[in-house]
Amino acid sequence: MNGATKKLLFVATYFPPVASGGNARQLRFLRYLPEFGWEPTVLTTRASGPVPDPDGVRIVRTLTPSPDFVYDAARKASAVWTAIERACASGDFRPKPSGLCSWCHFQDFCPAFGGSPPAADASGAAPDAERVGLDVGPRP
């Protein structure tokens, strides 16, 4: 070893201030890492609870999307993909110009800019539809 501090990213769904049996082991492990030349950073979710954050450990907290949020995002993505497939099958691509058009990288395909959309295959499916694989089942 050259004596340089090594960095460790510790990813934990449950971490103080959430109280759980597994947290005690995590805290003991993280407490002793600096003695052995490690600088731990914990990536975890935002939470509240009775246990204080440990000293000497950098903690980065992120938002955790709810199951409803994830389901709704998948449902919307599926609806957009269905609309794209429908437009490919019918050849009806109606542009909807907005203030965002100036940065769009698809102007070559947009009728509002004199472009033409890519042709659908013989089945009428959008190009590369099988690679997207959007399948939103029933809501949990």
Image (tube, rainbow, N blue to C red):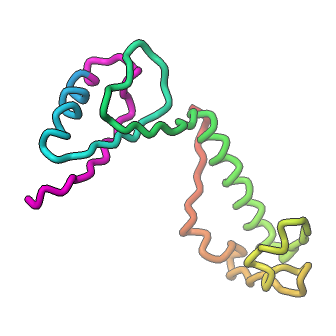
Q: Nearer the viewer, residue 78 or 19?
A: 19
**First to last magenta residue range:** 1-23
Q: Nearer the viewer, residue 83 or 49?
A: 49
Q: Per the image, is 39 magenta? A: no
Query: Measuring 91% from the left and 78% from the top, which residue is drawn there?
Result: 112
Residue extending farthest to the left is: 1
The picture places residue 7, in percent across and down from the top left corner, at 26, 51
Left or right side of 50 for 2: left
The picture places residue 13, in percent across and down from the top left corner, at 39, 33
The picture quadrant where one finds residue 102 is bottom right
From the image, give the main secondary structure of the stretch colored magenta: loop
Query: Measuring 87% from the left and 73% from the top, which residue is drawn there?
Result: 92
| Quarter containing the C terminus | top right
Left or right side of 134 for 125: right
Query: Measuring 83% from the left and 66% from the top, which residue is drawn there?
Result: 100
Height in image: 31 above or below 40? above
Residue extending farthest to the top is: 50
The picture quadrant where one finds residue 36 is top left
Height in image: 71 above or below 98? above
Q: Nearer the viewer, residue 92 or 42?
A: 42
Query: Measuring 70% from the left and 61% from the top, which residue is drawn there?
Result: 81
The picture places residue 134, in percent across and down from the top left corner, at 59, 56
| Quarter containing the N terminus | bottom left
The picture places residue 61, in percent across and down from the top left corner, at 47, 37
Q: Per the image, is 10 magenta? A: yes
Total numbered labels: 0
Left or right side of 62 for 129: right
Q: Nearer the viewer, residue 93 or 7?
A: 7
The picture quadrant where one finds residue 16 is top left
Left or right side of 59 for 65: right
